[in-house]
Image: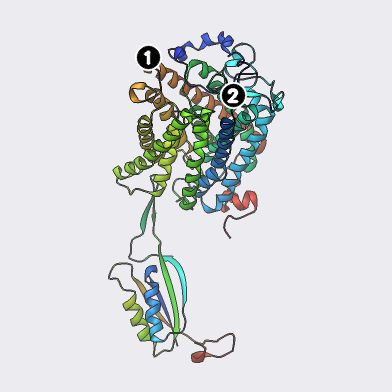
C-alpha cells in the first residue's frame, strides 16, 4: 500500500531551499513506509470525505459554471457553462484511467519520482474496497476509493478554472483537446510534486493545505499563457463587454463558497480539529476578502460593487486555500484582506495596462491570489501569529521553500500550457470563425440560445 | 383622432397611467425603449473596466384618442411625468387616419 498524504509541513526539512534541488534526486528512499497493520478506517472520517468530495463537485457544477457564465455576454452563456462541465467530465474519466496513477501511483525509480508517479495504478489496478489511503494521523486511514474520488474533483475543477481566460472565442473541440493534454503534462505532475509523499515540494516541506499551488497558481498561470496564445476577443478592449448577469454570478459565488468547505476542510482528510480550523479560516478569510475588495474600490473612487463583493469572496477563498489548516483565524483574516486588495489592483489596474485579454480574470484572481496565499501561508503559519507551526518555526527558511514552489509551479504551468495549446491548435484549430464569435458561441458551437 | 406618443421615465409609468385612466382613456401601449437626448448616459464599472452607456432606458407610451381629448391627454402626461429634472422625456402628437377593432370590425371613434 502506498502512503498517500498531503503535506502539513515537515519541520525538519524546512531549511531546504530550492537551491538544493539536485540533492533530492537521491532521496527517493524517503518514501514513507507502509502504514502499520493496525491502521483503522473511521466511519466519521469516511462520511466527511465523501461529503467533501460532493461539495467540490458543487463548486464546478453549478458553482463555477454560473460564476463564469454570468460574467460572459448572454450569447456565450451556454458555451461557457458547457465547456466547464465538459472538461470536468473529461478530467474524471482521465483521472480513473491514468491520472490518479500518475499523481499518486507507485513510485518510479530515480529522480523522476520527484515529478511523477508510475502507471502501476492505471485503470485503478489493485484498488479495491479494502484498500486504504493514509491521513495525517498515524493509524487513521480512509478508503482509497474515497481518496480517488476526492482528488478527482480537484483535477476536474482546476482544468475548468483555466477556461476563465479563454471563453467567448475558443472552439469547444480545442478546449477538450487542450484539457486532455494539459491534465496529463501539467496537472498530474504538479499534484504529485505537492501532495505525493515522493513529490519534490512535499519533501521540501512546502505548505499547501488544499491546493494553492496545485490548483490556483497552476490554473491562473495556465489561464494567462493560454489567453496570450489564443489572442484577444474581437473588439477587446474597445467594445463594451459587461457581464450579462451578475445575479447568476452572485449565485455561483455563493455555491463556490459553500463548496469550498469541502475543498479546504476536506483537505484535512479527517473530520477533526484541523478540519474545523480550515472551516473557520474558510469563513473569515473569505469574509475579509469580500469587504476589502469593496474598500479598495472606494479607495480608488469607485462605488462598492456587487461584482467587487463576489470577486473579493473568490480572492479570499483562493488565498486561504494553502493556508486553511496552516493559519490561525486572525492570520487568515489578514491574508484574505491582502489578497483581495492585491487582486483588485491586478484586475483593474495591471491588466488594462498590460493589455492581455484574460476574459474572466482567472489569472488576476486565481493566479495572483494563489501566489499571495502561498507565500503568505509561510508567514501566517508562525505560532507567534497564531498559526499552528512549531515553536522553533523558521519563517525565513519556509518562505524560501514557498517561493521556490511558487516559481517552479509558474514555470511548469507556463511551459506545459504552451505545449497543450499548440497541440490543440494542431489538432482542431484554436479559435472559432469570426462570424461565430460575432454571433456567439452558443449558437455557433452548440446550436442553442441560453435565453429564449 | 390623434396618436399621442410619450417617452417618459420608467418609474413614472404608474402615475401616467392613472392620470390617463381618470381622463377616460380606454387603452394604451407601453414599450421599454432606450435612447438619448440631453440627459447624459451612465457610467458602469466592472472590475475597473469603465463603460459609459449613451442610451438611457425609458418607457414609451402610445395612446390613440379623439382629437378633442388630445390636449388634455398631453397635459395629463406632462403633469404626471414631470419631475423637473433633466431626462423627463418628450411628448409627440400625430394625426391618425383610421382605427379598427379587429374583433368586431368597428371603426374610428367606436373602435377606441
Question: Do discs 2 and 1 share a chain?
Answer: yes
Mark whose residue sits in front, 2 or 1: 2
Q: Are marks 2 and 1 in contact (CB under 8 Å)?
A: no
Q: Is residue A213 left or right of residue A36?
A: left
Q: Nearer the viewer, residue A95 or A11?
A: A11
The answer to whether residue A16 is seen in the rendering is no
Q: Position of residue A208 (x, y in %)?
A: 48, 25
Give the vertical position of B43 relative to B19 (above or below): above
Chain containing the residue with disc 2: A
Give the vertical position of B43 relative to A68 (above or below): below
The count of marks equals 2
Q: Is residue A217 left or right of residue A334?
A: right
What distance separates the C-alpha of mark 2 from that of mark 1? Answer: 29 Å
What residue is shown at x 53% (from left), y 37% (from top)? A161
Q: Position of residue A446 (x, y in %)?
A: 64, 50
Q: Position of residue A319 (x, y in %)?
A: 43, 32
Q: Mark 1 — residue?
A: A392
Q: Which color scheme is applied? A: rainbow
What residue is shown at x 58% (from left), y 60% (from top)? A452
The answer to whether residue A15 is seen in the rendering is yes
Chain containing the residue with disc 1: A
Q: Which mark is residue A141?
A: 2
Q: Earlier in the sequence, mark 2 or mark 1?
A: 2
Q: Is residue A284 left or right of residue A32?
A: left
Residue A316: image quadrant is top left
Amino acid at each position: 500500500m502506498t502512503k498517500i498524504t498531503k503535506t502539513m509541513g515537515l519541520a525538519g526539512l524546512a531549511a531546504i531551499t530550492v537551491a538544493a534541488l539536485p540533492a533530492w534526486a537521491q532521496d527517493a528512499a524517503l518514501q514513507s513506509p507502509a502504514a502499520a497493520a493496525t491502521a483503522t478506517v473511521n466511519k466519521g472520517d469516511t462520511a466527511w470525505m465523501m461529503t467533501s468530495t460532493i461539495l467540490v463537485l458543487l463548486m464546478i457544477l453549478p458553482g463555477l459554471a454560473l460564476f463564469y457564465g454570468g460574467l460572459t455576454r448572454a450569447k456565450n452563456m451556454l458555451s461557457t457553462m458547457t465547456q466547464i462541465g465538459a472538461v470536468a467530465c473529461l478530467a474524471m474519466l482521465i483521472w480513473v484511467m491514468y491520472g490518479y496513477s500518475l499523481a499518486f501511483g507507485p513510485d518510479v525509480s530515480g529522480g523522476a519520482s520527484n515529478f511523477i508517479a508510475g502507471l502501476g495504478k492505471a485503470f485503478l489496478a489493485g484498488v479495491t474496497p479494502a484498500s486504504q489511503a493514509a491521513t495525517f494521523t498515524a493509524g487513521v486511514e480512509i478508503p482509497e476509493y474515497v481518496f480517488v474520488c476526492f482528488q478527482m474533483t480537484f483535477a476536474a475543477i482546476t482544468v475548468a478554472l483555466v477556461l476563465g481566460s479563454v471563453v467567448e472565442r475558443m472552439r469547444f473541440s480545442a478546449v477538450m483537446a487542450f484539457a486532455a493534454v494539459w491534465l496529463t503534462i501539467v496537472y498530474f505532475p504538479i499534484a504529485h510534486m505537492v501532495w505525493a509523499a515522493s513529490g519534490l515540494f512535499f519533501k521540501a516541506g512546502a505548505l499547501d493545505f488544499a491546493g494553492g499551488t496545485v490548483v490556483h497558481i497552476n490554473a491562473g498561470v495556465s489561464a494567462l499563457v493560454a489567453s496570450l496564445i489564443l489572442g484577444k476577443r474581437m473588439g477587446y478592449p474597445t467594445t463594451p463587454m459587461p457581464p450579462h448577469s451578475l445575479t447568476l454570478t452572485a449565485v455561483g459565488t455563493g455555491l463556490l463558497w459553500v463548496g469550498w468547505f469541502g475543498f479546504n476542510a476536506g483537505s484535512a482528510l479527517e473530520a477533526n480539529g484541523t478540519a474545523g480550523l480550515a472551516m473557520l479560516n474558510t469563513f473569515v478569510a473569505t469574509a475579509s476578502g469580500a469587504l476589502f475588495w469593496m474598500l479598495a474600490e472606494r479607495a480608488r473612487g469607485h462605488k462598492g460593487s456587487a461584482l467587487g463583493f463576489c470577486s473579493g469572496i473568490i480572492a479570499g477563498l483562493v488565498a486561504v486555500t494553502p493556508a486553511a489548516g496552516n493559519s490561525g483565524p486572525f492570520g487568515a483574516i489578514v491574508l484574505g484582506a491582502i489578497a483581495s486588495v492585491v487582486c483588485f489592483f491586478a484586475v483593474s489596474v495591471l491588466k488594462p495596462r498590460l493589455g492581455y485579454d484574460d476574459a474572466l480574470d482567472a489569472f488576476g484572481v486565481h493566479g495572483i491570489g494563489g501566489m499571495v496565499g502561498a507565500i503568505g501561508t509561510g508567514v501566517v503559519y508562525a505560532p507567534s501569529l497564531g498559526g499552528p507551526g512549531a515553536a522553533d518555526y523558521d519563517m525565513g527558511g519556509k518562505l524560501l521553500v514557498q517561493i521556490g514552489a511558487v516559481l517552479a509551479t509558474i514555470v511548469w504551468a507556463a511551459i506545459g500550457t504552451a505545449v497543450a495549446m499548440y497541440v490543440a491548435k494542431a489538432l482542431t484549430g484554436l479559435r472559432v470563425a469570426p462570424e461565430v464569435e460575432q454571433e456567439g458561441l452558443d449558437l455557433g458551437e452548440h446550436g442553442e440560445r441560453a435565453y429564449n | 383622432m390623434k396618436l399621442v406618443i410619450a417617452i417618459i421615465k420608467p418609474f413614472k409609468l404608474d402615475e401616467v397611467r392613472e392620470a390617463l385612466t381618470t381622463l377616460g382613456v380606454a387603452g394604451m401601449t407601453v414599450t421599454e425603449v432606450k435612447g438619448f437626448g440631453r440627459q447624459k448616459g451612465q457610467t458602469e464599472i466592472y472590475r475597473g473596466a469603465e463603460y459609459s452607456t449613451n442610451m438611457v432606458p425609458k418607457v414609451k407610451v402610445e395612446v390613440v384618442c379623439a382629437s378633442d381629448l388630445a390636449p388634455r391627454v398631453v397635459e395629463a402626461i406632462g403633469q404626471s411625468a414631470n419631475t423637473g429634472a433633466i431626462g423627463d422625456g418628450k411628448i409627440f402628437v400625430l394625426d391618425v387616419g383610421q382605427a379598427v377593432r379587429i374583433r368586431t370590425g368597428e371603426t374610428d371613434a367606436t373602435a377606441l
